[in-house]
Image (cartoon, grey):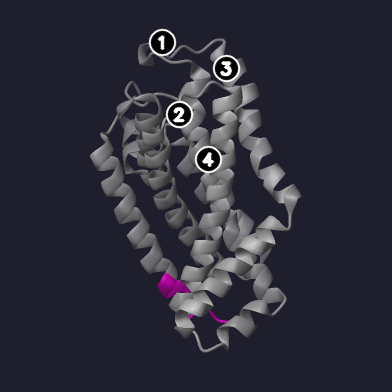
Amino acid sequence: MSELTGLYALWYRELKVFSREPSRIVSSLIQPLMWLLIYGTGLGSIVSVSSTGTSYQSFIFPGILAMTVLFGSLFFGLYVILDKRVDFLKEVLVAPLNRSTIFFGKVLGGSTDGLIQIVLLMILGALFFGIPLSFYSVFMSFLIVILLLVSITSLGLTIGAIMESPEGFGLITSFVIFPLFFLSGALFPVDKLPAWLHVFVVINPVSYAVDGLRTVILGISGFGLALDFMVLIVFAVVMVLIGTAAFKRMKI
């Protein structure tokens, strides 16, 4: 029971920190909305995805959802470094809790924060950008997003557990986040890419999240929904295992 109580306390702490910063919630929505409004409209005026039967703005919407998860959840690991500096993490680690419980509490907290952002973004997408949503597409999108949230939050926490400074964390994540995003097919169809570039898209696990979201929201599939879920589940399990190991070895 103490482990469950500790898990709940860590999750609730992360949720309260997020909810007490309205500016953080607003700022997390500005970037994806600017991509949709400016990039989607501007580039959409010269780029055609008519073969998909949808507008370019709608086409990149699933990719923008994935981008929101990437940028928000990966940088969640930065709070581990900040917690080290204010000795909050040291106080948590001396509590009678397994480090795996502490890690899962952080993952749940970060994933909940990210899910709130995605819900708000999907509502705005349906209201102002004409994104077609149904009960099925919303439910399946949440499943895909949750798997991606757990994976990327675990990755961010792993980097945060290893790094000692915010500057080092930012440098490492820059080399991780941009290849994951730009090589995911978030902004372009992947079926006509050169063979050498298509290889990087295929080995990028985020590509399967984008493809899964695009499948359930727009009905446009590249890899197949079954393969998308299979890759995302494996990715989530692997990242959780790596993150748990990193937290167990973390030094304060």
Q: Which residue matches tag 2?
A: 133
Q: Earlier in the sequence, mark 1 or mark 4?
A: 1
Compared to residue 31, the image places residue 114 above or below, namely below
Q: Which residue matches tag 1?
A: 50
Residue 94 part of the magenta-drawn span: no
Q: CA distance from mark 2 to mark 3?
A: 24 Å
Foreground mark, 2 or 1, reads 2
x and y, in percent, of residue 205 in the image: 36, 46
Callout 4: few (<14), some (14-19), or many (20+) C-alpha neighbours within 10 Å? Answer: many
Compared to residue 205, the image places residue 3 above or below, namely below
Q: Earlier in the sequence, mark 3 or mark 1?
A: 3
Q: CA distance from mark 3 to mark 4?
A: 18 Å
- Where, by quadrant of the figure, is residue 191 drawn? top left
Q: CA distance from mark 2 to mark 1?
A: 20 Å
Q: Which residue matches tag 3?
A: 43
Q: Residue at x 61, y 61 (%)?
A: 15
Relative placement, left or right, of 210 versus 115 is left
